Structure formats: C-alpha cells, structure tokens
Image (tube, rainbow, N blue to C red):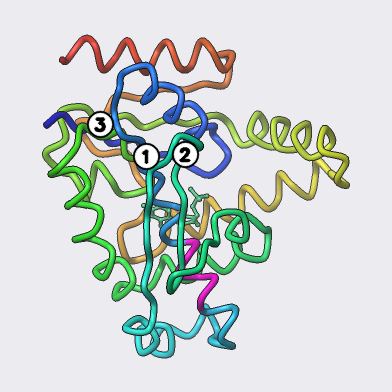
Amino acid sequence: MFAVAIDGPAGAGKSSVAKAAAKELGFLYVDTGAIYRTIALYMLENGIAPTDPAAVEAALPQVKVGLAHTAEGQKMSLNGEDVTSRIRTEEVSAATSAVAAVPAVRAYLLGLQRDLARDNNVLMDGRDIGTVVLPDAQLKVFLTASPEERARRRTAQLAESGQPADYKQILEEIKARDHQDSTRAAAPLKPAPDSVLLDTSGLSFEGSVAALVGLVRERQ
Ligand code: DC
C-alpha cells in the first residue's frame, strides 16, 4: 500500500487539494479532521464541555463514529445518524480544536486511521498524520499558506456564499487556532522532519493539485 500523509494548518486548502489529487491518483481520500469534528459534535449535543478533558474521555465509549466513502465524498455518521453537514459549523470548529487536544481522543482514533491506511492506498489529511498516525508513509507533505492568504481565501469563500465576512476577525481566528493546534501537548501540529513543504500561497488551486500529484508520482 502507498500512503501519503498531508498535514498543515486550518484553511490552507488541504482538504480540497488532497481530495482532487486523490481522485486523479485513484487513492482513497481520508479527512481525519471530520472524525475529530464528529466527536466534538457529540460533546456539544450532549452538554459535555469540550474543554473538560475528563468529561470528554468518560463520554468516548458512547461515541460510535462511522466513515463511508461514496461518490460524493467522505460521509460521517454519529451513532448511526448522518452528520456530514452538521460538523461544518463554526461552533463545531471551535469545539473540535479543544476536543482534539485530549490525549484519550487521539488514542481512541489512532487504530481507526491506521486501519484505513492498511487496507487502501490513501491520501490522509490531518495535523499529525506524518508525525504520529503514519510515521512510515511513503510521502509526507506539509501543506500550508500564510495566515493572511488563508484569511483572504476564507473571506472570499464566505462572501461568495452570502455570509458576513470580516477579514480582520477571520485572520485573528486563524492565528488563534494555529496557536492552539501547534502548542498543545498532545500531537501538536508540526512538519515531520522528513516532510516536503508545499506552500500554496502563490499557487492556484489547479497548481496546488498538480504539485501534490507530481510529488506522489515522483515516489511511486
Ligand atoms: O482539518 P479540520 O479543520 O477539519 O480539523 C478540525 C480540528 O481538528 C482542528 O482544530 C485540528 C484538529 N485535528 C487534529 O488535531 N488532528 C487531525 N488529524 C485532524 C484534525
């Protein structure tokens, strides 16, 4: 099996770039952030504070996360119910950052992620895929863009869908999430020493996909 680990900060375009590259390569695209988001949604819906590690850990046995890969992409279920779109709110994003810092949550999800890479050629996207989940991946990519570029893209995306978008506020939120994800004790966001840096700040979407596909083909 061939595994590509893709890590990087929020809003760098990792998911869309990795998804398109996986399609071109015929690999399974695994969005691990969606798995963490599903756990966070459970906590929010059951009145468990995402910032209370002991309460989050105690609730884990009640959380059954399901993943299905369909023609429309990766679908997530929580205790049998489809939550694919419900995990994409800002409220869930904020809760996920806290839940993902709980070591018991990370340990709970490790086996699930490794099993997917054992059975399929994968392009797996997350924060600790190259460093913790798949340390033997054939290719590790740290995909990033400057905070300003990420804030610009997010502002444009929100404006396009008719939602209020304040560039300055979005930039502050991006910086705060970067800080939380990269300074937490459990599996902080950082490039694996043997990763290739792919900075998409000056690249178009198509250019980013081509660069990623090119990196995989070089090693295949
Ligand atoms: O990629 P995303 O924005 O959907 O990730 C949501 C949150 O989950 C983000 O705060 C980082 C965290 N996460 C993580 O800690 N480890 C992963 N492998 C994937 C996501």
Instruction: Specify which label sits upstream in the sequence, 2 or 3.
Output: 3
Packing grade of label 1 (10 A; few <14, some 14-19, many >=20) is many
- Secondary structure at badge 1 equals strand
Which quarter of the figure is the N terminus placed in? Answer: top left
Residue highlighted by disc 2: 73
Foreground label between 1 and 2:
2
Tell me if label 1 and label 3 are in contact, CB under 8 Å. no
Q: Does mark 1's beta carbon lie closer than 8 Å to ligand 1?
A: yes
CA gap, disc 1 and disc 2: 19 Å
Q: Give the range drawn in magenta.
A: 37-42
| Quarter residue 29 falls in | top left
In the image, what residue type sits under mark 2?
Gly
User: Closer to the camera, 198 or 218?
Assistant: 218
- Secondary structure at badge 3 equals strand
Identify the residue at horizontal 37%, vertical 55% (top origin): 67
Ligand 1 shows up in which quadrant of the image? bottom left
| Quarter residue 89 falls in | bottom right
Tell me if label 1 and label 2 are in contact, CB under 8 Å. no
- Label disc, if present, on residue 4 of the rendered structure: 3
Residue highlighted by disc 1: 7
In the image, residue 220 lies at what x, y percent? Answer: 15, 15
CA gap, disc 1 and disc 3: 10 Å
Identify the residue at horizontal 21%, vertical 9% (top origin): 218
